[in-house]
Every structure is written in C-alpha cells, then in structure tokens.
Image (tube, rainbow, N blue to C red):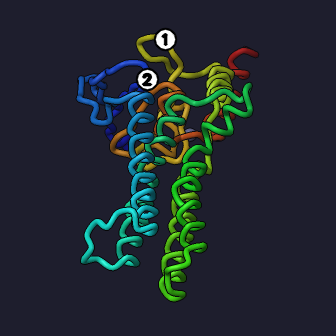
Amino acid sequence: MAKKERNIIEVAEKNESNKKIGVDSKGKLVEVKETPKEGAKTKRIIAICLWLVGIFFEVVAILRLKGTIDWIPSMSETVFLIVCLVLDCIAVLIGSQFWKKANHIDPASEKNPTKFWIQNNLGSIISVIAFLPIIIFVLTDKDMDKKNKTIVSVVAIVALLVAGIGSYDFNPVSMEQVEKAQQEVLATGNYDVNEDGEAIVYWAEHSKKYHVDKDCPALQNSENVYFGTVKAAYEKGLTEPCRRCIHELEEEHTEEEKQ
Ligand SMILES: [Zn+2]
C-alpha cells in the first residue's frame, strides 16, 4: 500500500518564538497558519479587561436596582437587569477562556499550591464576584415585586453557574506536568528533534493525543501532521501521549541497546 502523502508542519511554542515557516513531506517550506501572535501575558491582560467589563455590568445593574442611575428609562428595571446579567456573563466567560489558554501556555508551578490553585481557579472566583453581590442585592430588595424578583434572581443564579462552570479549567496544566511529559518522551530514547535539538512530538488536526512516532498508525490518514515540542503540544491542549508510541519506541530502543 502506497503511503499517503502528508504535510508535516511545525508549530512553534507561543511564548518562545515567532516561527512562521514549516516543512512539508517533500522538505518544501510552507507557511504555518497557527503561528502565535500573543503570548500568555497578552491573553491574561485581555482576560482581566473582560472580567472588569463583566463586573462593570454588575455594578450598573446594582446602581439601577438601587435607583442611583436610570439609564434607558424606557426599559423596565427587570429587562434592564437581565440585559446587564447576560452581558456580564458573556464578558466573564470570554475572559476566562483567554485566562485558561494563558495558563496552558504559561503554567503555574505545583510547588506553590496556593498560587497554583488561585491561578487555575481565578475564572471561577471572578464568576462569584461578578454575580453573587447582585444576587444578594436582588434577594434583599424591598421595592421589587415577588415575580420580578424571582425572574431576576433565577437569571442571575443561572448566569453564575454558566460563568462559573465555563470558567473552570477541568484540565489544569502545571509546569511539572509539562516537564514530566518531556522526560517521558526523552525516555523512549527514540524521538525526533527540531533544528534547535529539542525533542518533538507529532499530532494531527483533531488529535486528542500527541505522538512520538511520526509514522504512528494513528497519524497515517491525516493530511496535515503538526509537530512541535511537548510544550507546544500542551499549548494546543494536547496533554496525553499516545501510549502505543511511547511503549513501542521504548521497546525498540531497548532491543537496539541489547544488540
Ligand atoms: Zn502514536
């Protein structure tokens, strides 16, 4: 069976360099589309700005509820509050996606458990700040009628849950985890290196795992095969090695050493 022709494309680490060129199967240089423009720092700044926008909408809602402001008087208080809550939720959620992405590019160390926990859960903490005060204000408001109170508080609680869960990183990455993964690749003794001499791994467009072996059967049918350091794979959200690759290469390596 003829081997399918594949493009082998390099993906640079976001925090490291700005390589824009990869190589295809014939050794021809091709442009790399997913080249990063922003590092973790930019993403964190965007996240914080969006979170502040979310909290701003919460403050506006509280001020309207208290009668301090009367923006868009034609809109009923209930509708106004719901609009604010929805905008709050959207801003917090988008901000948290930037934050999560930044944590995968530039992970925290597990050596400081408090910092690690806060950094990985900040999106959910912000969600509480962005919704809990307004929920308390609505529930304790004396002027609001019961029906509107129920509607607004239900919307606010749902928004808190959506933002809180959507901001939570179910797969947090630590510096140590990336280092361990790198060691595991090195331990196979049978890996490819990039031009800087760093060990590289491969993955396909929709891969959930990264591969040490470019010719792993799991990659055979992919038109584009990407490669990069383990760190670059982690940045792409690939945090699982293909066990088949790791074990077979390890075995091959041991066989070679025996001979
Ligand atoms: Zn594999």
x and y percentages locating residue 161 in the rendered image: 57, 65
Residue 121, quarter of picture: top right
Observer-side mark, 1 or 2, equals: 2
Quadrant position of the N terminus in the picture: top left
Give the distance between the C-alpha atoms of the residues marked 1 and 2, in whole angstroms: 18 Å
Disc 1 or 2, which lies upstream in sequence? 2
x and y percentages locating residue 61 in the rendered image: 42, 64
- Note whether residue 226 is visible: yes
In the image, is the residue at mark 1 within 8 Å of ligand 1 by its beta carbon? Answer: no
In this rendering, the answer to whether 206 lies above or below 58 is above
What residue sits 48% from the left and 35% below the top? 102
- Note whether residue 252 is visible: no
Which residue has dot 1 on it? 197
Q: Residues within 10 Å of mark 1 (few under 14, many from 20)?
A: few
What residue sits 65% from the left and 39% below the top? 118
- Please tell me whether mark 2 sits on a helix, a strand or a loop: loop
What residue sits 58% from the left and 39% below the top? 239
x and y percentages locating residue 251 in the rendered image: 71, 29
**Does the residue at mark 1 contact the one at mark 2 (Cβ under 8 Å)?**
no
In this rendering, the answer to whether 225 lies above or below 127 is above
Question: Observer-nearest residue: 106 or 194?
Answer: 106
Question: Observer-nearest residue: 190 or 147?
Answer: 147
Which residue has dot 2 on it? 15
Label placed on residue 148: none
The amino acid type, in three-letter code, at marker 1 is: Gly
Left or right of 240, for residue 64: left
What residue sits 59% from the left and 61% below the top? 132
Q: Residues within 10 Å of mark 2 (few under 14, many from 20)?
A: some
Q: Find ligand 1 in the image and state its quadrant.
A: top right
